[in-house]
Image (spheres, helix red, strand yellow):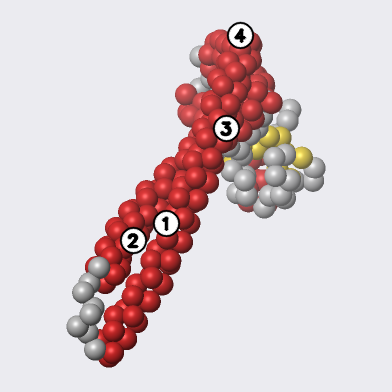
C-alpha cells in the first residue's frame, strides 16, 4: 500500500494546524481573552457588591426602625407623670431609661456604620463600572485586531484546505478514516516513520517484535503506546 498521497496530505495538514496554533497563541488572541476576563471580573464584583448593598440596606432599615421605636420609648418615659411614683418605681424607670439610652447609642452607631459601608460600596461600584467600561472598549479593539489577523491567515488556510481536498480524493477512504480518527485525538503528526532501532517516530517508544512483524507485512501499524500510525520508509 502506497502512502505517498496521505503523507502529502499530512504535510499540508500540519501547515494548517500550525496556522491554527499561531492564531490561538497570538498576542491578539491573548488580549481578547485577557480583556474578556477583566470585564467579567468587574461584572462579578458589581454583582457581589449589589448583593452586599442590598443586605446592608436591609440591616440599615431594621436599625433605623429600632432607633425610631427606642426614641419613642425614651420620650414616653420622659413625658410620663412620675410625681405619684415611689422611690422604687422611680429607680425602675431610671434604669429602664438608662438601658434605652444605651440601646439608642448602639443603634446610632449601627446606622452610622451602615451609611459608611453603603458609601464605600458606592465608591467601589463606580470604580468597577469604570473598569468594566474600559475592559469592554479594550475587548472590542482586541477583537477587531484578532479578526483582522484571522482574516489574513484565512487566505493561507483556504489555500491549504483546497490542496488537501484535492489530494484526499486520491486517498483510500479507509486510510483517510484512520487518519482522521487519530487526528481527532490530537496525535499529530498522524503518520510517523519507524526509527532505528525499532522505535515509533512519534513517541519514541520501542515497539514489540509482533507489532514490528505486522508492520513489515502491512506497511502501516498503530503504535500501541501513542496510537499514531507507523510506516516504514522506502
In front: label 4 or label 3: 3
> Pointer 3: what residue?
131
In front: label 4 or label 2: 2
Nearer the observer, 92 or 117: 92
Query: In the visual, does 94 lie left or right of 211?
Result: left
Spatial CA distance of label 3 from label 2 is 38 Å
Nearer the observer, 121 or 140: 121
Q: Are marks 1 and 2 in contact (CB under 8 Å)?
A: yes
Instruction: Check the image and name the residue furthest to the right.
Output: 196
Q: Is residue 55 visible?
A: no
> In what element is the residue under mark 2?
helix
Spatial CA distance of label 1 from label 2 is 9 Å
Q: Is residue 11 above or below residue 34?
A: above
In front: label 3 or label 2: 2
Q: Are marks 4 and 1 in contact (CB under 8 Å)?
A: no
Q: Is residue 223 above or below residue 129?
A: below
> Pointer 2: what residue?
67
- Where does the C terminus fall, quadrant-wise? top right
**Where residue 115 sits: x, y (%)?**
45, 50
Spatial CA distance of label 3 from label 1 is 30 Å
Nearer the observer, 53 or 106: 106
> Pointer 4: what residue?
155
- Give the numbered dot on residue 111: 1
| Quadrant housing residue 148 | top right
Amino acid at each position: 500500500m502506497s502512502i505517498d498521497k496521505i503523507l502529502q496530505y499530512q504535510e499540508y495538514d500540519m501547515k494548517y494546524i500550525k496556522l491554527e496554533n499561531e492564531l490561538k497563541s497570538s498576542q491578539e488572541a491573548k488580549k481578547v481573552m485577557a480583556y474578556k476576563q477583566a470585564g467579567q471580573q468587574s461584572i462579578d464584583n458589581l454583582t457581589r457588591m449589589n448583593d452586599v448593598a442590598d443586605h446592608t440596606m436591609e440591616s440599615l432599615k431594621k436599625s433605623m426602625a429600632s432607633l425610631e421605636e427606642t426614641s419613642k420609648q425614651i420620650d414616653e418615659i420622659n413625658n410620663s407623670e412620675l410625681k405619684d411614683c415611689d422611690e422604687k418605681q422611680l429607680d425602675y424607670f431610671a434604669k429602664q431609661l438608662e438601658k434605652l439610652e444605651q440601646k439608642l447609642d448602639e443603634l446610632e452607631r449601627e446606622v452610622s456604620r451602615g451609611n459608611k459601608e453603603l458609601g464605600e460600596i458606592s465608591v467601589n461600584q463606580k470604580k468597577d463600572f469604570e473598569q468594566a467600561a474600559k475592559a469592554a472598549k479594550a475587548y472590542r479593539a482586541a477583537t477587531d485586531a484578532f479578526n483582522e489577523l484571522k482574516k489574513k491567515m484565512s487566505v493561507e488556510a483556504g489555500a491549504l484546505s483546497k490542496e488537501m481536498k484535492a489530494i484526499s480524493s486520491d486517498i483510500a477512504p479507509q486510510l483517510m478514516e484512520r487518519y482522521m480518527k487519530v487526528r481527532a485525538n490530537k496525535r499529530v503528526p498522524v503518520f510517523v516513520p519507524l526509527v532505528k532501532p525499532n522505535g515509533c517516530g512519534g513517541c519514541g517508544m520501542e515497539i514489540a517484535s509482533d507489532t514490528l512483524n505486522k508492520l513489515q507485512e502491512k506497511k502501516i501499524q498503530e503504535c500501541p503506546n501513542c496510537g499514531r500510525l507507523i510506516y516504514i520508509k522506502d
